[in-house]
Image (spheres, coloured by chain):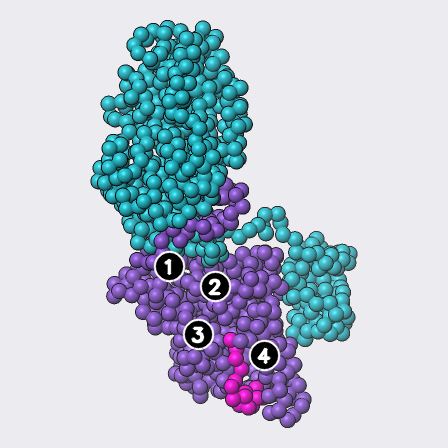
Amino acid sequence: MTNKTIADLFGQPLSVVNVGLSSMAQSVRDQKVPVVEVDWRPPAGGVPQLRMTKTGVDIDDANEEVCRRIKQARPVLAGMGIARDVIPGMHDRMLLHAGPPIAWDRMCGPQRGAVMGALIYEGLAADEREAEKIAASGQIEFSPCHHHHTVGPMAGIVSPRMPVFILENKAFGNKAFATQNEGLGKVLRYGAMGPEVYARLKWMETDLYPALDRALQSMPDGIDIKSLIAQALHMGDECHNRNRAATSLFLRAIGPALARTNTENERLAKVIEFIDRNDHFFLNLSMAAGKAALEAAEGVEGSSVVTVMARNGTDFGIRLASMTDRWFTAPAGMVQGLYFPGFTEKDANPDIGDSTITETAGYGGFAMAAAPAITQFVGGTPQMAVQATLEMYEITFGEHEGFTIPSLNFRGTPLGIDVRRVAETGILPRLNTGIAHKDPGVGMVGAGILRAPEKCFRDAFAALGTLC
Amino acid sequence: MTVKTLVKRSEYHDSVRLMLVARELAKLPGVIDAAVVMATEANKSILKDSGLLTAEAQAATPNDLVIAVSAKNGASDAALAEAEKLLQKKGEAAAGEAAEFRPKTIPGAVKSSPGANVAVISVAGRYAADEAWEALRRGLHVLLFSDNVTLEDEIALKKYARDHGLLLMGAGAGTAILNGVALGFANVIPSGPVGIVSAAGTCLQEVSTLLAKYGVGITQGIGTGGRDLKEEVGGIMMLEGLKSLQADPATKVIALVSKPPAKSVVEKVMAQVALSDKPTVVCFLGGDPKLVSAANAVPAMTLEEAARLSAQRAGAAVKVSPEAVERDLKKQARKLSTKLKPGQRYLRGLFSGGTLCYEAQVIWRGMLKEPVLSNAPLDQASQLPDSTHSQKHTAVDLGEEEFTVGRPHPMIDNDLRIRRLLQEARDRQVAVILLDVVLGYGAHPDPASELGPAVRQARELARKAGRELIVVASVAGTEEDPQRLSRQVQAMTAAGAIICDSNAAAARLTGMVVSKGPRRKDKG
């Protein structure tokens, strides 16, 4: 029951939604009355309407709570540490990886490459051959980043001695972790191996990390990453495939502290140069901020909202806010991409990485409309980028008022993928991503877009159905 | 094979655009590999690995753009030129690609249009209820045009709508006019003091256009769908619509029109009517007027009368006197009937509007001795055995399902009616044919342009067979309708049709013609 009455409509300007015959919409349009024409198709057959759980939870209410928490989250870069010391559950013989759980024998090329590279970097193996033997021997425990409040781009390998950023969600107190971004090209996260990869990782450990860490220690309030994301969305980034503005903003935010806490000018210059030359330096912060926000929303009974989407290059997996210990997986898809010189789609590995945490948290591919510079990924025009974002509102439960899109009249980004809406509409989440070479040891070969595989969402929806 | 590079100083493009250009270059004949990159250290090492790093590229700075091509002799220069061309080309959207975004679902539509307040739903019946639920749950009023929604669904939808202060018009509601906006099949009616609730679309169209002809406008025209007044549905929307008009200060007079409701529904509706002081004109076509008078409401026997009485209650000086109209019709009928040959005894009504067919039958029931058969009869005894063949007096509703499966409604597509008209014209027993022409949004853009020539042809056919065929028509429409009333009337008149001001008048005239036929000696 509501207090609303039919008579409330009288005298109000009419605004019409038309579902069906186009002529009906045209008549309304001819009268100069606004009409939105639904591009209707028959819904997927036999999709039940899920509204309440057996335990009496209204799913919409649960989703409202999930979205509220995500929006309320305030992820701040609070400091740094060594993975072994700060990531819960991490130990000397553990490697974290992107995506849902996977054993060595099913790992894809780039993830194997990154594992081997990490073992060499850790000093556990002398060369690739030994690294492969150790990896296959069972001496190493592989665990998903997501099981440790961590997210890793591409192969997503986090080894015990790697330095990590610590993101603290000031609104809820939870923490999330991510490594420092290595840059593009031949890098460990794309499965590359070789002396230059290890040398860079080493330098990041001995020079980059201490410099950033010192600077951050001098900043008692840390750096508000949510705010940087919000600003970057107004500067042409979507903070997944484009982080150029956000990286610049980060450098501005940490610049004075870096200067004050680092006395060796040349070392400092190298640090600044490294960050400046890597447009994706911010990506790992963007991801960890998403993780910190989403994890605070986990554990809401009855919610149909997705809080994890991740890929290990073999499988694509999602988790729901209401079923946090359960992965719904499907084979990872192929990326429609643009390739670096010398590479084609034949070289590409299936979709990989935890970076889809950005889309899950309401930006990345879902904020495509904010990033006109990379519209080539979606067909080339800014209008197409806008449409890509508009389509995602169909499958999201809410909108993130903290992240707005100028070209949509500062509308909040689509937030909270609702598996019910995915099941009902058949519209799958659009993802932006980089592309790794399928063989271990090669690295990044391009970037592109794709849709998440349907099966995960169907299965999650079915699981939710058993509770209703 | 040669490797050539072109360095463009201080030229910046986003890397994605550059990759796209590189991809185009690689497709050119003779090109083996191509790279278009900003000359950062990382990119230079990529160039080096691909064998594309020339000394010139090596010397470039991160602010410079490098176009590098390895190609068979001669092809590289052309490729470099092409690259420059591609870089200058603005993103061109192919026609249609940049078209307005169309959401795929109602929730999506509501999100992209937060002010939306009405949904018009016309998808196939088996999907329609789900869409109506989506709309109601998002607070939209609904015009549910679709047929074949189950009665259970309709009841549940209407109960929900009632409890949430929303309209659920339908299922099968073809017409509504809300705040002056015509939805579905509806006419352009001026705004004014009369509020209408109607169970059928053509009812609403006939009454509202007649009001407009009398110079009276409406506040709202609410359609409930034909099944609303069944016992099972209980008149939920007629009651809610009525209440809303009773509460609406702009509505001074209320008109309720429909076929006769179930008895229990009549009681409920009349009880609600009695709660308000607003003059309320009630036309339950062919129903018992005593039930109406008992509730202090004004009974009307026809849609025309409902419109006239409503107009008068609203203070309009309606000049037409029913008695004078009746006299004129009789005179006209006498004149027409003299032209008929012996044996031309029957009338044939070919309707596009279901309720107009019903209204005509109600009128004829009181006039004609022989029953009028119909595919949509007043009672089972008058069922026309074969819808496609008329017998004796026949009224055909061409909007009934047997005619509309797989083809457009006769208000949109005149084909079927024209064929039927010619078929009737060949029948030597036929004296007069009655047509309804319904204008407004949703209807055929110029019905007289097709029906006119058909009338001419039909009369010609009869004339060649030595008979005069009388064609009578009414046109429900207004001057402001897209088809323009006067233009349609003119075209129909020019084609030889006799135009009456209302369906009721047209029905009476045809009834009089056949009851005054030369072979009939009984009273006129």
Mark 1, secondary structure of its residue: helix
Q: Regarding mark 4 in the picture, which secondary structure is present there?
A: helix
Regarding residue B43, the answer to whether it shows in the image is yes
Question: Between tags 1 and 3, which lies in front?
Answer: 3
The C terminus of chain B sits in image quarter: top left
Badge 4: chain ID: A
- The three-letter amino acid code for the residue at tag 2 is Pro
- Label 3, residues with CA under 10 Å away: few <14, some 14-19, many ≥20: some
Q: Nearer the viewer, mark 4 or mark 3?
A: 3
User: Does residue A220 show up magenta in the picture?
Assistant: yes
- From this view, report whether residue A201 is shown above or below residue B406: below
Q: Which residue is mark 1?
A: A420
Give the chain letter for purple: A
Image spot of residue B37 (x, y percent)? 68, 67
Q: Earlier in the sequence, mark 2 or mark 4?
A: 4
Q: Chain letter for cyan, please.
A: B
